[in-house]
Image (cartoon, grey):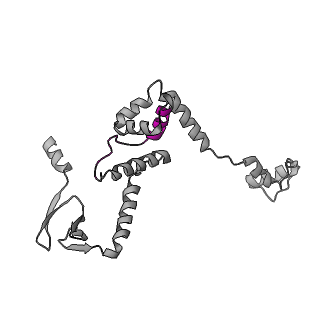
């Protein structure tokens, strides 16, 4: 198979569809719906183009504008933590997005790339350099993920990160007193089972309950 054939097979198919209002739209791959929002005068509108050529135009009612705005804000902020398992990283990602939105930046990508592991790195840098967290956050915001990974391996930073991660893991360890829970099975008593009780328990698991159990 030639490289040209491979490229042709891997390229997604594009279907050009004439919409019922006279426009044409390109549907890539298996996409069934294209969405577009725009403002006309005092009205906010959403256009939905379906792959079969039909289109729908929805004008947001004025009395529901704030509700739709709130829904969009929830979605925008919630989407920012996709792929992040660590809660501190997720919070840092949302904080970063809120800062960008406050500056009027809607579509701009985060300069520093991924946020995985950034919260621990920020704490380690703040401790190592005795700097405010906000200063460290601004510093890291412009670093690529590769640069952040390299910083985590720096000999002056790695021991701090290892300690912080160990402390975090310890906090997540269950503090439940399992010995006390087991003691409830003995009626709250710490006495050991009698030989007869132990033999009966063993016989139960051996499947010989009902046979004569000798102490």
Residue depicted at x 35% and y 65%? 69
> How far from the left and from the top, in percent, is residue 22?
10, 71
Residue depicted at x 73% and y 47%? 177
Q: Nearer the viewer, residue 141 or 207?
A: 141
Residue depicted at x 36% and y 69%? 66
Q: Nearer the viewer, residue 124 or 200?
A: 124
Residue 107 visible somewhere in the drawing: yes
> Would you say 148 lies left or right of 42 here?
right
Above or below residue 162? Residue 188 is below
Residue depicted at x 47% and y 28%? 129
Residue 2 visible somewhere in the drawing: no
> How far from the left and from the top, in percent, is residue 215?
89, 49
Q: Nearer the viewer, residue 32 or 81?
A: 81
> How far from the left and from the top, in percent, is residue 11?
18, 50
Toward the left, the furthest residue is 22
Q: Nearer the viewer, residue 30 or 134?
A: 134
Magenta-drawn stretch contains 125: yes
Magenta-drawn stretch contains 113: yes
> Would you say 51 lies left or right of 131 here?
left
Toward the top, the furthest residue is 155
The segment highlighted magenta reads: 107-126
> How far from the left and from the top, in percent, is residue 101?
34, 53
Q: How many marks?
A: 0
> Would you say 207 lies left or right of 192 here?
left
> Would you say 30 lies left or right of 199 here?
left
The quarter in which the N terminus is drawn is top left
């Amino acid at each position: 198979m030639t490289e040209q054939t491979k490229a042709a097979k891997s390229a997604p198919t594009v279907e050009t569809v004439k919409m019922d209002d006279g426009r044409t739209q390109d549907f890539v791959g298996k996409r069934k719906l294209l969405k577009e929002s725009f403002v006309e005068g005092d009205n906010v509108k959403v256009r939905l183009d379906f792959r079969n050529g039909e289109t729908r135009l929805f004008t947001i009612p004025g009395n529901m504008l704030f509700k739709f705005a709130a829904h969009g804000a929830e979605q925008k902020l919630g989407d920012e933590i996709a792929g992040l398992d660590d809660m501190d990283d997720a919070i840092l990602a949302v904080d970063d997005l809120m800062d960008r939105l406050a500056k009027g930046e809607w579509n701009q990508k985060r300069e520093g790339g991924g946020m995985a592991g950034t919260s621990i790195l920020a704490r380690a840098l703040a401790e190592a350099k005795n700097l405010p967290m906000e200063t460290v956050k601004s510093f890291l915001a412009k670093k690529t993920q590769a640069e952040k990974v390299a910083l985590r391996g720096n000999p002056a930073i790695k021991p701090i990160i290892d300690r912080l991660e160990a402390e975090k893991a310890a906090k997540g360890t269950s503090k439940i007193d399992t010995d006390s829970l087991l003691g409830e099975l003995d009626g709250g008593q710490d006495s050991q089972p009698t030989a007869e009780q132990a033999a009966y328990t063993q016989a139960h698991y051996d499947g010989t309950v009902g046979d004569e159990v000798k102490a």
